[in-house]
Structure formats: structure tokens, C-alpha cells
Amino acid sequence: MKTEFSLAQLADSDIAEADKILRACVHCGFCTATCPTYVLLGDELDSPRGRIYLIKEMLEKDRRPTPEVVKHIDRCLSCLACMTTCPSGVNYMHLVDQARVRIERDYSRPLTERWLRAVLTFVLPRPQWFRASMWLARLGRPFAALLPAGEATATPTLLRRIKAMLALSPGRLPAPGPAGGTVFPALVERRGRVALLQGCAQQVLAPRINQAAVNVLTRHGVEVVLAAGEACCGSLVHHMGREHQALAQARHNIDVWTREIEGGLDAIVITASGCGTTIKDYGYLLRGDPAYAAKAARVSALAKDVSEYLVSLDLAAPARPGGLTVAYQAACSLQHGQKIHKQPKDLLANAGFKVREVAEAHLCCGSAGTYNIMQPDIARTLRDRKVANIGRTGADVIATGNIGCMTHIAQGTGIPVVHTVELLDWAHGGPLPDALKGVRIDANDSQRIAVAI
């Protein structure tokens, strides 16, 4: 792709990076086949190639974002399926992130949308506030059906978004998990030490996930520490264009984890793949910060998805070998963002599960951080498509490696949903996941489990 940035523009490191990304694009259109919004809407501007043209025009001419540009950029899920498909290696992730920063800086959204975004970016990264908001949402759920839905539009109304937000709130909240500063010693001879990301929404909605990870790790000789003072990874605000807030959160965590690294740390293990993709990108995000560039790169190098780290341990034979059939599908942030495909399948197979894949595994379920709140119509359509494909496997249970996918998919199906590491914990001697307690389980292949990691 030919670009026409001026020398003055190219002096800006972000513009220089955008120029490099744009020049890699050869207009082939392979990305359109795997882009969820293009598959659903059929609009070229809702494909990666179309969005690239919009971003190029905005950046080259240094124009303020128009409502049309904002509409199509907002519709992007950042699932990154286009990057998996692209034969030219176009780094769409960094390009669309830059566009979102420009929109956040230069575009004035309607007041109600600014209000909702401000609430989400304040509450979701703060577990105490998020827990309080979930209690309030629980009180409001009975009234959600009374809210007028209105018609689906290019920009959903505030009421449609509030309805979507209330629908995602759980019926009950579990007790809080262990606090930062807790250390879980290895249960056998120690062979490693890791920090486990505590997360934001996940530690409120499903602390059992990290507990399952702790169980598997300590059972195999790995000491697990919950770093004191850890905060949100910055993923949520980063994808909403709030660059300064995202980088501040990244720097904070880098300082926290650096202290642990100095005490000896083999990895920073992450059970929410959306967080993992962002943390693995810290080195890029802070590449221009002399005080943090090297530390950020070190943290990114240590960041491992839980499946990625567990594969390296050569886990013991499962305590409960059986004939359970697993229909596997990778979450976008895992398969496209982190390029992790084989590890979860190997873990499941080695744990005694028979692995099969779900059709259209490359298509996003529609969760994508706050996407299922900000773009509820597209998100719901993608979710229903995902659930239908899972249903065709004859699945009795769905497992996911990302809390956003878990919560979103659960709204569209009566099939129980668990995290993959919960299955692995159970197979290696841990407790039966709560979601499976009402499910008949045997070892003669009559049980089928669909896994969306």
C-alpha cells in the first residue's frame, strides 16, 4: 500500500509505525473471509481492509475522526483473526489500537456514551468497585425486561447497552479469593516459582479459576505467588483508546512483578487469555519509555498463558483417566492474539479427554472485552452462531480459557460452562467443577464436553 505521510509526520514514532504497517498491506482481501463483522454485515468498511483504508485516510491527512470512521472502528472486535489469515504479516492490532487512541483524543461522543464509557473504565479494572456494581446489577436484573429495547441501529442506544450489561451480571457472587501477597507453596519438591495474575473481573466472578490453576501448579512442584499490589493489566482501557491510563496500569504492574522477578520467577502465569495478549505486548507499548522499555520487555517475555506453562511441566498421568469427548475451540485472544493452538489440545488429550474441534473456530464469540455491552446486537448474533456450532457437537459442557467468553457464551445456552484449567485440575486429582455437579459423568464416551479456550 502506498502511503503519503510527510517527513514531519514520520518524525512521530507512532506514525512511523503506522506507515510501516500500512505499507505491508497488499489489498489481497484474505482478511475479509475471517473477519466476524464482515461475515455478518457484508460491508467492506466493516472488514480489516476497509478499516485500514479509513485509518490511513485519517492519519495521513491528520483529520479529526468522523462519525462514519468511528462507527466502523467501534464495530471491530479486535479478535485479530485477520492477522492469522494475512499472508503479508500486517500488524492490524497495533494499527487499530492507534486509531482508537486518536478517536478517544479527537472525537466527541454523545454525552450518554461518554458517561457509559467512563463508568466502565472506572469500575471494571477495580475489583472492589466491580463487586459492588455486580450487587447493584443483581438488584436491577428483574427490571431489565421492562427496559424498552428499541430497534437495532448502527449505534445502539444507552438503554440497549444497559440491558446487555444487566444480562451479563450473575445471579450470585462467590466469596472473594485469596488476597495479593498470598504464597502457595509447592506440594512436592519445588521445581519452579510463578506469579499468577489475579485479574479484575475474573477474581470477582470466578475466583475458582485461579484456585484450579494453583491446585494444578502446586501439585506439580510449582510455588505460586499472588503479587502484592497488582492491578488491572490495562487491557480494557487500552482497547477503549485510553492510552495514558493503560500505560499507567502497565507501568504499575511492571514495578510489582519486577520485585517478584528479582526474587526468582520463572513465569507470570495468566488464566484470562485477553489479559495475556496485552501483557505480552507491554514490551511494544512501552518501547519508547527509557525507564520502562527493558523492564516491560522482560515482563512480556515471562508472560505465559496457563496452558502454555502447563505444557512445559510434563504433567503426571491423570488421576481420573476416562473417555470424555472434548470439542475444542480456541478463543481469539489465544489463537490469534498469542498464536497458541496446540498446547491446550495436548493438555486435554494427555489428561484423558478425546479432543475434537468446533466448526468456525476462527470466528469470535462476540465477547471481546466490553464489546458485548457497547455493540450488543452484533455480539449477540456472534454468540448465537457460536452456541449453535457448539451445539452441533452434541456437547454437554462448555469450557473456556477466558472469563469474558465464559460469561458471554453462558447467556446464550443452558449448557454448563467451565474453565479449561478446572477440567485439568479435576482430571489431575482436584475437585469436580461446580458446573459439572449436575452432569452425569462416566468413562464410556457417553459424555461430551465442548471446550472454547
Image (spheres, rainbow, N blue to C red):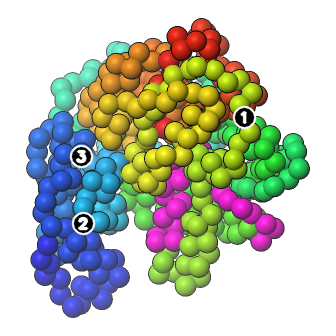
The residue under label 3 is 35
Quarter holding residue 363: top left
Specify the amino acid type for callout 3.
Cys
Instruction: Using the image, determine if residue 213 lies above or below residue 251.
Output: above
Residue 49 vertical placement versus 341 (above, below)? below
| Between marks 1 and 2 in the image, the one whose residue lies nearer the viewer | 1
Q: Which of the two discs, 3 and 1, labels the residue nearer the N terminus?
A: 3
What residue lies at 43% left-to-right and 58% top-to-bottom?
A: 238
Residue 340 or residue 232, whichever sits in front: 340
Tell me the element at label 2. loop
Q: Is residue 282 magenta?
A: yes
Q: Is tag 1's residue or tag 2's residue first in the polypeptide sequence? A: 2
Disc 1 residue type (three-letter): Ala
Q: If you read the primary sequence from the N terminus, does the residue marked by circle 3 or circle 2 appear first? A: 3
State the image coordinates of residue 404 (x, y, percent, origin top left). 47, 37
Q: What residue is shown with label 1?
A: 317
Instruction: State if disc 2 and disc 1 touch (CB < 8 Å).
Output: no
Q: Which residue is mark 2?
A: 88
State the image coordinates of residue 258 (x, y, percent, origin top left): 70, 69
- Mark 3 and mark 1 residues within 8 Å of each other at the beta carbon: no
Secondary structure under the numbered disc 1 in the rendered image: loop
Which marked residue is nearer to the observer: mark 3 or mark 2?
2
Q: Residue at x 27, y 53 (%)?
A: 85
Left or right of 378 in this view: 407: right
Can residue 235 be seen here?
no
* Left or right position of 265 against 41: right
- Cα separation, mark 1 vs mark 2, equals 42 Å
Asked if the magenta segment contains residue 425, the reply would be no
- Residue 81 image position (x, y, % from top left): 31, 49
> Residues in magenta?
262-285
Q: Secondary structure at mark 3?
A: loop
